[in-house]
Structures are given as C-alpha cells and as structure tokens.
Amino acid sequence: MEKQRLKLKVNGQEHELYINPKTLLVEVIRDHLGLTGTKRGCDTVSCGACTVMIDDMAVKSCAVLAVQAEGRHVRTAEGLEKNGKLAPIQKAFLDQGSYQCGFCTPGMLMSCEALLEENPAPSPEEIREGIEGNICRCTGYNSIVRAMGAVAKGNYREE
Amino acid sequence: MKKYSVINTHVHNVDGIAKVTGRAIYTFDVKLPGMLYGKILRSPHPHAKILDIDYGKALDLPGVIGVVTGKDTLGVKQGIWRRYQDLCDEQILPVDKVRYIGEPVAAVAAMTEEIAEQALDLIDVQYEVLPAVYEPLDAIKKEAPEIHEGFERNINVTRHIEWGDVEGAFDEAEYIREDWFKCGGQAHMCMETRAAVSSYTPDGKLTVYHSSQSPYYMRGLLAGVLGLKESSIRVISHYVGGGFGGKFELDGAIFCSAVLSMKLCRPVKIVFTREEDFIATKRRTPMSYYVRTGVKKDGTFCAREAKVFTNGGAYTGMGATALYLTGFFHSFPYRWKGYRYDGYRVYTNTLPSTSMRGFGAPQAMWCSEQQIEWIAADLGLDSIEMRRKNAHYSGYEVPDQASIASCGIDQCFDVVQKWIKEKGKLPENRAIGLSAAGFMSGGIFNWFDSPYSFSSAVVTINYDGTVELHVGAQDIGQGSNTTLAIICAEALGVKIEDIKVHSGDTDHCPADLGAWGSRQTLMAGNAVKMAAEDAKKQLLEVAYAQSGFNIVYDLDIKNRWVHALARPERGYDYAELVKKAIRGKDGQRIVGRGYYTPHRKGMISPAYSYMMQAVEVEIDKDTGKIKLIDSLTAHDCGQPINHLGLIGQLEGAFSMAAGYGYLEYMPYEDGKLMNPNLVDYKVMRATEMPEVPVAEIDTYEPEGPYGAKEAGEGLTNPTAAAIGNAIFHALGVQMKECPIKPEMIVNALNEKEAKEKEGKE
Amino acid sequence: MIHDFRYLKPGTLQEALSMLAEWRDECKIICGGQSLLIVMRQGLVVTDTLVDIKGLNELSYITYDDGEGLRMGATTTHRAVEKSGLLKEKYPILVAVEKKLASIQVRNWGSIAGNLAHGDSSGDLAPVLIALGGKIKLGSVKGTRVVPLEEFYTGLFETALTKDEMVVEVQVPPVQPRTAVAYKKFNLIESDQGIVGVAAAMTVDASDTCKDVRIVLGNSGVTPIRARSAEKVLLGRKSGDRLLEEAGEAAAGEADPVSDIHASEEYRRHLIRVLTERMVRQAWEKAIPLE
C-alpha cells in the first residue's frame, strides 16, 4: 500500500508523516508520534479513552481517519499544560481525586476541556452529559463532576 | 475521630501528575527495542480434543517470527491455589484439550499486530469436538461429559461451614422461609485490557511488564510454569489500568508473551482487544443459591441453611476462595444460633469464573438481604430494627470462624434510619431499598503457599530527610501508593511530600501478596507503619543521646519537628537530626524494616468492615425501567487514612455494584458470550450515577494501622440487594435473579397480577 | 484490521459523483466514519476504494424557508443540528433527538447523512425524520432524485441507494400549524441505542381532533416501520385514554421486532405499545396551542 503524506498539527507542533491512509488518528498519535497519553479501550467507539480535541471539538480518535485531521489542530492530554503549568481542569482533577487507575483520564480530560471551552459554566447535568461518552470504571464519575463544577465556579481562574 | 497530621487529611494522590498529564506509562504503552507483537488463536469450541496444530503456513507469512502452542511449554498445570495441586488445573496453552470457547490454542509473534492477526487465519487446528455442558446442575449429572480427569460429577471444590445446632435452631423458629436465587456473572471490564510485554534475554533472564494486581504472584507463577528461578524473573507493573480482582492470576497475555519471548529471545507484546478481554479473562462467579431461614415472630434470627452451586467454568482460578467467602459472608452481619452452608463449585465448559471485587459477597448479600427484607415484611416488622436485633457487635465471635474486634454496624443503622426519616414521603414511583453488609480486610489463608511475610516494607531516609518507601503492595488505581505514603509520613513524623513510593517492580521491592481481598491498607499499612517506626526509633536514639533529658521525657517527631512530648515548643528540625544520625552511622542511610502477617486471627480475616446502604430508586411500572435517584451509605472502615482515595473508592464501588444490580448482564448461549463489547455490555455512565454520600462511622480497629480497616471492596456487596429491595417496596415483587432487567420487572408484575386475579376467583 | 484501500478525496460534489460513477460497487463513501469505521475494523465491510467526502463543506448547511421547509446538507454533523438555533425554533424535536444520540464525540464528527445511509434500524434520526415527512435527496452523475425517507429503507442495513449514488441532502417539509412531534427510545442508559423507539407526529384541527398523524417505530423491524394501523385508529378522533390504548395495541401488532439478548419479542411489543401511547399523548397535548 502506497503511503500518503500527512501534515498534522498536534499540540501546537507541526508534523510531517507518511502513513497508510487507513491509519486511524489514534494510531498516528500513539504509534507514530509516541504520544501515549491517549489510550484505547474498545473497538466499538464506546469507551472514550481515545478522546482528543480536533479544533474545538472532542472526538474519539479511534473513529477518525488520520488523513481527515489534516489542516486541523489536534490536541491531546499532553497539550493541556503550558510550559509545565497545569490547566485548570488538571488542577481540579488533582484536588478532587478525579482519577484512580488513570487509564480513562487523558480522554476524560479532553472531553472536559472541550466542554469548558464551549461552556465555561456548565450545570451538573450538562457536565454529566458532556462526559457521557467516556467510561470510567474506577471513580463512579462524581469526583469528575465535582472537579468540573469547581472549574465552572471559577476556582482556578488564571491570574 | 482522632486528628492526625497527615492521616485523613486532604492529600493529593501521589501519582497524580503522571496520570493527569498523560505521562503515566502503562503496560499498554510499553515499547521495547526489537519488540514483536503477539496475537492468540482461540478455540471456537467449548470442549474439544486438540488433535493437531499445523502452523507452517503462518510461519511462511512475511513478518511472522514465531508460533508457539502447548507443545512449546512444559505443560505445567498451574493455578493460584499453589498449595493444593489438584486445584492447579490450567495450562493456559493447553496440550491435550480445550475446555471453553476462547481458550488459547496457539500464539503468534510478528513484526506488526496486523501481520500477527493475519497469521492466525493461517494456523490449522484439528479438533475432535466433545460434548459440552454449560450449567452446574447439568454438569453434575451422571451422564455429563468429564471436563477434568479425576473430578467426579465435575465437582471442582466443595465447602462446608457450620456452627451451632442447626436443626435445633430451626425447631425453635416460629417462621421459616425458603427461596431460590440466581446470581449472574460480571466482567471486570478494566479500562486497560490484559496486557503484557515479555522480554527474555540470552542471560536466561525474563523481564515482564504486566498489567497486574500482584507482581509477586506473577513472578512466582511464571517461575513455576516456565521452569525458571524466581530470581531470574522480573515483573514490572508501574501503572495498572484497573484490576478489580481479575488481574492477579496468570492470563493469556502474560503467559503467551513469555513463552514466545523465551522461544524467540525477542521482546513480545500482547494486548487483548476488548472482545478478548470479555471472552477470555475470568469473570465473577455466577451462583445459584438456595436459602432457608428460620426466625422468631419477634424477628430474632434462629437458623439459616444455604446450598449453593457455583458455575466454575473451565478452570479453578480463585473460585475456591469465592466459594468459601460467599458462604461465610452470607451470614454477615448477623448472629445465627445455627448456621450451615454447603457450597459446590462445578466445572462447566464456559469462561472460568474467579474473584471479582466483593469476592462472592455481592452474590451472598443479593440473596440474604432481600430474603431478610421479605421476612420482615411477612412478619410486619421494621427491617432495620430486625437487623439491629441480630447484628454483630465489637467483641463478637463468629463461632469457630472469626473474632470481630471492631464493629460499627449499629451506628450505621442509626444513620440510615435518620436519613430515611428526613426523606419523608416519596413520590409514588419511588422507593428506598436497604442492604447491610460486612467484609474482610485481607485474607489469612495462605493458599499461594508463600514463604514470605504477607506484606513487607523498607523505609530509607536520605541525608536531606526525604524518604524512599519500598513496598510490594500494588497500586492499581485504588491509591495504595498514596495510602501507604500517608501512613509512612504519619508514623515517621514527616510530610507527605517527603515520601517517594517505590512499588510495582519485583527486582526492587519486597514481596507482597498484592492488591486483592482488600488487604493492603491493613496488611501493607501495618508493614509500613512498622518500618517507619523502626526508622524513627533509630533517629530518636540519636536524639535521646543528644538531648540529655531525664529518662521520663519522651521524644517524638511530628511535622518534621523533633520535640519532647511534654515540651512540644522546644525542639528542632527533623532534617538536622537526620544529618546527625547518618553521620553517626558512618554515612549509612537510616533504614527501617517492617512486615506483617496475620497471626492468631482465625483463618479468614484479621478485621472486618461494616456498612448499611440505602438506595432511592425510581421505577417506571409500565416499562420496568430503573433510575437511581439518591443513596446513603453508612460505613465503618475504622480510621480512614486516605480521604480523597476513600471517597473515590466508595463511589467507584457503588457504580460497579449498581451495575451488578441492574445493568451488567452477561448472557451465554451454548458456551458463547453474546455481548463481548461495550455496546451490548452495559456499564454505568456519568448520566446514570446518583449522588453517593457516605457517612463514616467512628470506630477503631486494633489490628489495623491507626485503627484502619478495608474500604472499597465491601461496598460492592450491598447495592444489588438494595436495588432489589427498593423494587420490592415499590411494586411488591420479589426479584430472584440479578442483574435485574426491566423485562424481568414487567414479567414479575404480570405474574403478580395474574396471581392476585386467581386469588380473587 | 481494516483492509487496505485506495484513498480518494474529492474537492467538490461533482468530483465525488464522478468517482462514484467510475468505481461503482468497488468503492465506499466515508464522511465522519462513526458507523463505517467500526464495521470496516471488524472486516464486515471490505472495500478497495474509499471516497472521503468529509471535506465537502459545500454539503454542510442547514437552511430553511417557509415555502420549501428545511434543507440539511449531507455532511452536516449531528452536533451542528444539535446546536442550531434555527432548528431549535423550527424543528425542536430534531435538537432534542440529537442531544441523546450516541455521545458528544460521535456527534461532533459524524454526519447526519452517514447515519441515515448506514441503514441501522436502531437509529434515532430516521424514525423522527419520517414522522416529520422527511425526504432524502440522492445524487449521481446522472442527476438527483428525491425519495420519501420511509421509502429509502429497503431491508436490514439496506437502502435505495444505487451503486453510483450518494446522499446529498435531507429535506423536511414545513411543519403544519397545530402540529407537534414526540420521540422516545427505550434504553437502560441515556444515549444508548434504543431497544425500541417510537416517533409520533400529530396535527390537530380547530376542535383538537386528529387531522393528521404519523407514527414511526424504530428498531422494531428490519427498517423503520410506519404504524399505519395505529394511525388509522386515531385519524378523525378526539383524544382519550381508551383510544390511545387501542393505537398502542395496533402499533404493537404492526411491529416486527426481534428477540435478542436485550429484550424478547414480547417485551419489545409491550414497549412499543406503551411508548406509542405515551408519544401520541405527548404529541397531542403539545399540538394543542395554549389558549
């Protein structure tokens, strides 16, 4: 299979890759770029562990052909921090203990971040709907909702 | 509750930064130079002889490096119950026959995952299909096919628990009720599927990265099956994406990758797909329960008799323990004059069943707590008061079984009663269901036959006062690294930031039985406390020598402050003391050692947690759909240690337990799992979770570090029964089978209506 | 594993249609891929050529006028429908249905046409659009044709698309006055696909009598089913408990549901009966304007 050239912007960085066009975005992120924060937990677009942001949207990267992300900005959990400074949602997760095994966490953070960027003050119901596509087997979700609520309240407003 | 410097304060999880920034490397992420990708060929038959495996065509496929079958192994029948050879019955790559659909038959290593998968289609296996049997009551028939040689009637394990004069106690009873129940299986469904990277090198050493609950068990088991010395094997589990009881036995990923790596002398990575994780990793044990209970009209419990058949599936796994614990916890948390339990674990040609969070107790409570509610209703008694009348208390001895040193169940009843009263009248389509439970804080019975202390810890103090804490306890998300760091900091008298936890590597960490049976806070916690106190003692020896105080004055370290207890304001920085102490030891760091193995605590557990849970459920009568509205759990775990971790564990336990109650059905047809994916296997999502407030009851467990007991597994026990009881109170129907599907509720209502009509005619 | 394919990315709709004409049954169209990639990964769909229309922004639009009604381009995402202020005003049922469809991530990337063309009878959009009298516009190099959506589904995962056709637009007629639409799917978890689903569109006359009604059953057969017998029960009648029960029973009788691990056939019929009653009642109540 002839490889295709793909120019991809990930976490603010431009990359040039040569890939088989059937390569999924999650495979490019994890295997070609070595960004293993984003995980995979299923084969049926169900679990959300592979959630990244494409432009301002949360998407499941296991259900996106990498070639379709050309010209867009892909953001993963590794891109949330700025020069080592954690994003508000990351700080909130630490304060609330919104993770346990941590496997769903990178994807969960991206769903949360996408929601906050669209709606900086979501209600608890909106928060739950916002992360409905992400399965967490450990936390029971309520600590994640609390973390989002804290950010929504403005507890982590950047100076 | 006592106030501590570090214990039960709001401490960040020590692995937090790695986990929230995507830096944590799980076995799923591990990549080694020269690594190959492995895939497993699985049996399509539930029961068949393996006549021949021809993999020549697979080897010819470009990119395929090697193939292994049972013939490449030592053929060792292994099992986690090492002490009992006849229960070590699983080869993982079987040599002679397969016993369940999905069992590994061969494994391929190739340059890419895709090539490995293509190679599977090129392996030709000749089977002689044998008759198969899927249900315990069919498998014990005389004409049923023999699944394991030497196990008559396919009865794998039996357990018998009895105390008191059971028949006499039944004679005393004024009301007797008997019911039959069915408890389903459940999938662990860890977010990280089974994964292993095995690397065998020409020096005869094997390094394995494994998503595991017990690197120590993995090392021991691998040594047994591979014919290697334990010290030649290194197991690494830095970050584990969930375990829940499914990851402390050898699985197909670790075994096949190790065998491939040994044959090819290359690293081999095997990661299960979600489908493989469903069909080929052991599940919660499905059980059929018969319960007969006798009480007095005033609600005093007299006798209980239970007969249980469990569907063991094709291999023993941890099923023998689950068989015992279900019968034991079926008596909890109550006093019985006469109690008898007979459990039969039966082999069938289905997915082997094993331990899963709760370890047989969720099934036990599903039956016991519902029947108790029905008895209270039959007799017109308040079910909480009836429970209270018969409950355990501190100092109670479960005859021949256990000593209950601390028990807060009575206060649990008070809290729940108050909550129900404050709720007041509920809307018509809602009801509250209750369930009590109790659980173990680690097991005593050494079926693994470990020669080592159950838990060990080493505390090493550096010159700058920071601490290296080496433990064998495994963090699988429950937060043990943090919990143990907290205990260490408190015991030593330093801050949590001073502690660096080392775990998850058998080369660098002491042996520890691992994360199961809710044992680590109590057992590893005790080991850590002992090690920290040992180190502190060595520091204080130097401090005493310096201080010149009268011998009646005691010194201590708290918040990095060395001081006399009687004069806390007069003291000095702990860091100064450390420098002096190390100088005094000729430049050697201060090393403290600790360990713990339960002694003289019976054969089950050193301590027991208690709880009472109330769940408010809304039910749509016409469709049978259930919605969880609210809940309250009163919980006695002794002294809470890790505040954030505790809340997370309790909320998480609820989500899993509720799933067992009404979402996570695992239907099989002729030995085949019908929903091996996350579309058709339903798990709790954020929109379904109610608030799960927990009221901690203040008790102190003498056997636990700072009085602590387990938390997080016990709370998987009550919820299914609580949901069942809510349905009983809302609709008057008795749900005998879990998980409850809406269709079952509609059918039960129709049956009830039909019976009532009949009654009228 | 996904089978290797030749990847084609047309820049315009015309290019896409030419490609379809050239490759015909040897190619598949992908837009968001939220349904397609799963079945390709499982090997259920194997194709040598994939035509990617995700980038065809000319097909991403939501327009409305009182004469023609609603027009939505094929590559319009679910999320665009969910967030559309225009739709919230004119066709709020579409916004409501999208809110509970799959997950936000899937709605962000998946297209409405992809969803409809996939032909999954457990889908939510098709029953609702059929209840609204929706039509689907199919295009090929030969031109376009408009097909009523209820005629678009011909069998299990089968549609009326010929080998050289693709969906270009979804059309919904303007909503008549005194009309309301209700939809509910039955599931254990919010946003899960429905075990069954019922859409009801009710138009009443000045005396609140049923003037026009469309009842569509989802996941109750190999395709969405117009419950015409149930509709007949209601036409020209005034609302009442007994009438609604009758309609529910009729709908349950018309359905052709399967028995699977989630529900038996009887229970599905039972749900259809209950949901039909409820949706018709809801739509009827909403259709009557507040005085």
Image: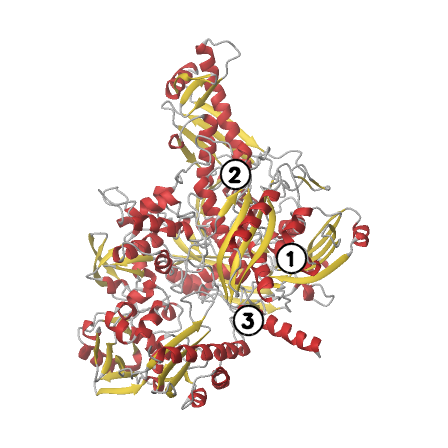
Given residues C262 and C197, the one toward you in this image is C197
- Residue at 34% of width from left, 61% of height from top? A62
On screen, residue A157 above or below B724:
above
| Mark 1: secondary structure | helix
Query: What is the three-letter code of the residue carrying label 3?
Result: Glu
Between label 1 and label 3, give the one nearer the viewer: 1
Q: State the quadrant of the N terminus of chain C.
A: bottom left
Q: Earlier in the sequence, mark 1 or mark 2?
A: 1
Give the residue number, with chain letter if any, for mark 2.
B521
Q: State the quadrant of the C terminus of chain C.
A: bottom left
Q: CA distance from mark 2 to mark 3?
A: 41 Å
For the residues bearing labels 2 and 3, Cβ distance under 8 angstroms: no
> What is the crowding at mark 1: few (fewer than 14 residues within 10 Å), some, or many (at least 20)?
many
> What is the crowding at mark 3: few (fewer than 14 residues within 10 Å), some, or many (at least 20)?
many
Residue A149: assigned label: none
Q: Are marks 1 and 3 on the same chain?
A: yes
Give the residue number, with chain letter if any, for mark 3.
B743
- Residue at 43% of width from left, 42% of height from top? B644
Between label 1 and label 2, give the one nearer the viewer: 1
Query: What is the three-letter code of the residue carrying label 1?
Result: Glu
Between label 2 and label 3, give the one nearer the viewer: 3
| Mark 2: secondary structure | helix
Given residues B59 and C251, the one toward you in this image is C251
Left/right placement of residue C119 relative to residue B748 reads left
Q: CA distance from mark 1 to mark 3?
A: 23 Å
Query: What is the three-letter code of the residue carrying label 2?
Result: Thr
Residue B373: assigned label: 1
Residue B97 at x, y = what percent? Answer: 60, 61
